[in-house]
Amino acid sequence: MTVLLEIENLHVAFEVDSGRLAAVRGLSLSIQPGETLALVGESGSGKSATAASILRLLPASAHVEGRILFKGGDLVVARDAELRRIRGDRISMIFQEPMSSLNPLHTVEHQVSEVLSIHRGMRRATARARTLELLQQVGLADAANRLDSYPHQLSGGQRQRVMIAMALANEPDLLIADEPTTALDVTVQAQILALLKSLQARMGMAMLFITHDLGIVRDVADTVCVMTEGRIVERGPVATIFSHPQHEYTRHLLAAEPKGVPPVVDLNAPIVVSAEGLRVWFPIKRGLFRRTVAHVRAVDDVTLNVRAGQTLGVVGESGSGKTTLGRALLRLVSSRGRIAFLGDDIQTRSWRAMRPLRKNMQIVFQDPYGSLSPRMSVADIVGEGLKVHVPDLSPQDRRSRIEAALRDVGLDPSTADRYPHEFSGGQRQRIAIARAMVLEPQFVVLDEPTSSLDMTVQAQVVDLLRQLQRRRGLTYLFISHDLRVVRALASEVLVMKDGKIVEAGPAQDIFERPRTDYTKALLAAALKTAAPAVLNSGLNSGEA
Amino acid sequence: MIGAAPGFGGPAWAPADLATASSAQRFSPMTRRRILLFLANKRGVWSLGIFLVLFVVSLGSEFFASDRPIIASYKGEILFPIFVNYPESKFGGFLATTNYRDPVNRDEINSHGWMLWPPIHFSYDTIDNNLPVSAPAPPSWTMGVEQRCSGYAQGVGDPDCIIGNMHWLGTDDQGRDVVARVFYGYRISVLFGLVLTVLSSAIGVTVGAVSGYFGGWTDLLIQRFIEIWTSVPQLYLLLIIASVLAPSFWSLLGILLAFAWVGLVGLVRAEFLRGRNLEFVAAAKALGVDSFTIIWRHLLPNALVATITFLPFILGGSVTTLTALDFLGFGLPVGSPSLGELVAQGKENLEAPWLALTGFFTISIMLSLLVFIGEAVRDAFDPRRSVR
């Protein structure tokens, strides 16, 4: 068989303020026709830069060296006109973010048929027919009526299907999928993966599948290349990589599954936070006088108890209202219904009267890049709460408490005068945790604190959270869509869908004997991709 | 190698970055980056340099163009006429202020000491009574010595027909030296522009911040008020007020300020509307931080980027507004040094092109400098630009 794509000794470097930042350092790989090659690595490993350099989609600040041979022609030195003939026709690409990779002002039909008219010169009617056929192929429900929809009218999964239809329109020889499922919910993720696999088999195209999640390539890929710091450190057939990982880093990735035992369920522990009939309804206003015609029921009649020293996991897909629930409990969004903190009704308190309580109830947010003010030093960020709640602390004492908090979360206290942008994602999340912990709260809402982190870092943050909980007897409300993390942390679980609680109970019961179909589907989608060995060990430790 | 927890070591380029950061602790890395970006724009740096030099020079206009000597020695006493208003009686006269250009006073002081004059012996309001031709007089260097000195009593030999009494850019139609008027006019234009910019930005940012941060009814009321306010015809209002109130630097500033603050509100409001939903603001709220602190410490620094980018352009706009009003005759009181009035004179006296040309070049160079500075500032705050 001839080689379809061959990359030889590829180097990619970016011009940055402090010099040249090497993203890819001497990468070589080859893809046969019809083969699926998975490029796996954590953020910053250079995998996306590799993908973008194939079609020369890198920004102008990038320097590319090496050879990228596609059917014998070198794409690195190809003329633009030549490259344009290949892009979207022979090689096409699916991007990570279905939100931003579709033009919001074009209809679905327009987006898909554009590729057809450029490369095939199709006329409108023919293109429309072909578009419909493609949309049906990618399993877009009610495709005929979706042709005239705009991207905002589609869900994330539907948008990704449209992206795939665009990529497949000209039956390319090579499909580059750059993290195609990362931004999607687990159930949708599974569907898209299955779809890609079946389409690939049917069309016989090759696929370069880029992901940070080693778990999901098991079902998709033929060959796996593990990448770190711009180099491929291990390559081989998918089965070998999973059964006999050679390189230390591959083993590290495989072992990165969050592990450990959550605190034991103790129904007699005192209740720290409870809510009864909690509702957050956002009004939908229409017409000239902005009359309220209906409500979006973000949180609808939720009743829960969080017990001291334990973790209540809140699980659900995007839009299920879990984040709103967490913020409502801290009275950061207005809600109806009873909220009690240590038996004291806090729903009736004014914003001002809430302030003394805030010391005891803290929150850690999902995005460590957005939750730290870029213009404040780490010491200022961590010390801000102290200034509010312990205003008469002397500067030296405040400093020493800040440094103690940083040490607690595993950061070097000497970094206190640096700014957030100098830290990696995992370190930033540790700073955010330090900001919450420095006040020594009793109750902490953890709003997806691990979901924007790499797998290995995720496991470390989970360990840190559990260790802090044990040492300080903390009570957590842990919000996540990632059941693997929830299993490692939560003693009780609450499954949410469309603002309502679908199922609740001890974590062990929910994971082993889910009662509702929704929970079953969620579990199946999330855990089937995990390596069986890890799955079992996780469950066993859960029982212990 | 990678065994030491990858993803935790920070990016590979971090160490070099940190080393330089510690050597310049005073600035945050972002500020340092912006300064470097600004310095990379050579045209902007040069413009800023020239603008600052011109501004500082114009602040000391009295030392360059004045109808009083800087230092004088009279009967063994050292005098500073530039700062101190000595009565004429000190030199044997009877007036309340001394006219040092008067030949009688000049001879009296020179015979009992000496005088150190600025390079140009005219202030902005000094009327030269010894012009060889009727005002407006052309630049002195276009005339021969004979003609130039013909206005003085002793002709070429007159002790006043010296280089300090030459009009390098001619005089205006009242016989006042154009160079002196440009010096003082530039100073008043820039000062007026600066004060107007600072005050209107302060008000605009405050209103925009309140409007954007609190939203809801506060926002609604402020925005409707601004819509009504901006639809008031400024110029007519100015004409009416000017007919009631005597125009002065401060009254003019007040009237223009009443309308100028609106400019930044929309921009700052948009930044705050975006910023108040960011997670670090939610985090601050969860910490119990009060609204004022959130606005001041968390949101304002972010909104300031947009504001600072606009400042040089607002400054240019303010200067232009004052010039335009002066040109129309509704600006500073009669007799004030003003670039707008210079241009207006140029229009009235087309036979004296030095007036219009001087006015044109002064204003256009000043505005060009401000625009170039503004471009460099804009580049400096552009996150997509790299220093190298």
Image (spheres, coloured by chain):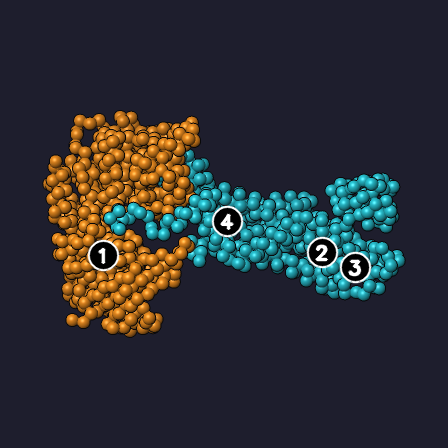
Chain colours: A orange, B cyan
Relative to A200, say whether B126 is above or below.
above
Residue that carries the numbered disc 1 in the rendered image: A233
Q: Nearer the viewer, mark 4 or mark 1?
A: 1
Asked if the residues shown at circle 3 and circle 4 are in contact, with their CB atoms under 8 angstroms apart, the answer is no
Disc 4 to disc 1, how far (Cα)? 48 Å
Q: Nearer the viewer, residue B129 or A119?
A: B129
Given the image, on which type of amino acid does mark 2 rest?
Val
Quick one: quadrant of the C terminus of chain A? top left
Q: Is residue A311 left or right of residue A81?
A: left
Looking at the picture, which amino acid does disc 1 mark?
Val
Residue neighbourhood size for the residue with mark 3, other residues' Cα within 10 Å, grouped as few (<14), some (14–19), many (≥20)? some
Badge 2 is on which residue? B179
The residue labelled by disc 4 is B308
Q: Chain of mark 4?
A: B
Tell me the element at label 3. Answer: loop
Closer to the eye: label 1 or 2: 1
Q: Position of residue A146 (x, y in %)?
A: 25, 59
Residue A428 as seen in the image, left or right of residue B328: left
Residue B109 falls left or right of residue A469: right
**A4 and A102: which one is in front?**
A4
Q: Which residue is mark 3?
A: B135
Same chain for marks 3 and 4? yes
Marks 4 & 1, CB-CB < 8 Å contact: no
Q: How crowded is the residue under tag 2: few (<14 C-alpha within 10 Å), some, or many (20+)?
A: many
Q: CA distance from mark 1 to mark 2?
A: 74 Å
